[in-house]
Image (tube, rainbow, N blue to C red):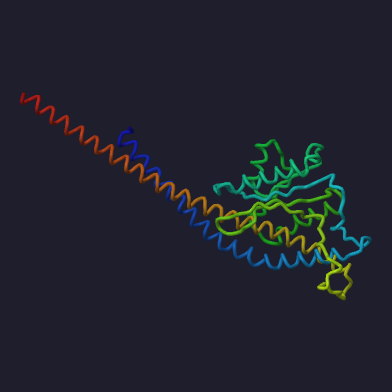
């Protein structure tokens, strides 16, 4: 059994760690409120805009395809992996990184083997995980989380769209953590480009013939880039809120574990102290009996 000084030192160390994890939990909780409000406010707008664009794309004629809806054989693929710049958030970064790697090794194995699969990383932690699998990211946009605004994100989303239009990539996939609540994050892999049209049942009686002003083609060409920029921004807001939720949960568990460990060490300390007192009494008693004898 460890001596009393060692146990006392360890108790002090664990108490200090508990103070740190408790403070980090409170900071993450405060940041989570702001991040959660941001994603909950934009989600209905982004989802409705995405539905509208999918419907508009689905009713276009084949020869009227937008440059963002053209389906090509995916010879060159880009996977945009969104993580966080900081750790201490449980399996948040490792899970989403493994999801991207799984996507690459299953759906895009041929492109990966031929060197036609690129990774764009947003968040330092994903880059670290990829390197453990001997995968090097082709570009990193970690600075986006330093000031996460639509204006800052717009430049990156436009660059990706331009690369698709220019033929640098035939398909772009987004992999990120979707915010469900503070304790739950869902790893999502979704096709960013080309835009997938919604399935339209032409025989359905609920379908309505709309008159578009200006023309349908003009609306699609104007709205698709805006919608894509919003969808990209929504993915980052999802990841940002999910990160703070994951960190708050991880720090809460760490604080509880530290409390349990302190209780165990205190019990061990009391047992060791009681044993030391008992030994001291026995030594005094034995010495007294030896003198009297």
Vertical relation: 62 (above or below) 77: below
Q: Tell me the residue at 69%/60% (across/down).
A: 234
In the depicted view, which residue is nearer to us: 104 or 12?
104
Vertical relation: 41 (above or below) 152: below
Outermost residue toward the left in this view: 292
Horizontal side of residue 88 vs 68, given as left or right:
left
The spot of residue 20 in percent (x, y) is 45, 50
The spot of residue 225 in percent (x, y) is 80, 62
Quadrant (top left/top right/bottom left/bottom right) for the C terminus = top left
Q: How many marks?
A: 0
Horizontal side of residue 284 vs 105, given as left or right:
left
Quadrant (top left/top right/bottom left/bottom right) for the N terminus = top left
In the depicted view, which residue is nearer to us: 116 or 166?
116
Q: Tell me the residue at 58%/48% (across/down).
A: 86
In the depicted view, which residue is nearer to us: 3 or 113?
113
Vertical relation: 64 (above or below) 274: below
Question: Residue 150 falls in which quadrant of the image?
Answer: bottom right
Horizontal side of residue 60 vs 39, given as left or right:
right
Q: Tell me the residue at 68%/67% (across/down).
A: 44
The spot of residue 85 in percent (x, y) is 61, 49
The spot of residue 32 in percent (x, y) is 56, 60
Q: Tell me the residue at 36%/43% (across/down).
A: 264
In the depicted view, which residue is nearer to us: 154 or 72?
72
Outermost residue toward the right in this view: 63
């Amino acid at each position: 059994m460890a001596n009393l000084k060692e146990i006392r030192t360890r108790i002090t160390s664990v108490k200090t760690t508990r103070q740190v994890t408790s403070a980090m939990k409170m900071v993450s909780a405060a940041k989570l409120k702001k991040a959660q409000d941001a994603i909950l406010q934009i989600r209905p707008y982004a989802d409705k805009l995405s539905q509208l664009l999918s419907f508009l794309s689905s009713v276009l004629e084949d020869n009227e395809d937008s440059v963002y809806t053209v389906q090509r054989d995916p010879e060159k693929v880009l996977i945009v992996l969104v993580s966080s710049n900081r750790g201490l958030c449980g399996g948040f970064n490792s899970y989403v990184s493994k999801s991207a790697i799984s996507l690459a090794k299953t759906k895009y194995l041929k492109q990966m083997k031929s060197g036609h699969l690129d990774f764009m990383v947003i968040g330092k932690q994903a880059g670290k995980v990829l390197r453990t699998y001997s995968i090097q990211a082709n570009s990193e946009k970690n600075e986006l989380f330093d000031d996460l605004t639509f204006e800052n994100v717009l430049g990156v989303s436009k660059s990706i769209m331009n690369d698709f239009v220019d033929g640098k990539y035939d398909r772009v996939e987004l992999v990120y953590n979707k915010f469900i609540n503070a304790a739950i994050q869902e790893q999502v892999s979704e096709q960013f480009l080309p835009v997938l049209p919604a399935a339209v049942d032409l025989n359905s009686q609920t379908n309505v013939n709309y008159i578009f002003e200006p023309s349908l083609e003009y609306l699609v060409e104007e709205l698709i880039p805006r919608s894509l920029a919003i969808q990209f921004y929504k993915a980052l807001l999802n990841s940002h809120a999910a990160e703070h939720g994951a960190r708050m949960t991880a720090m809460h568990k760490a604080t509880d574990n530290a409390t349990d460990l302190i209780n165990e060490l205190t019990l061990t300390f009391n047992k060791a102290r009681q044993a030391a007192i008992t030994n001291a009494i026995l030594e005094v008693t034995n010495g007294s009996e030896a003198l009297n004898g």
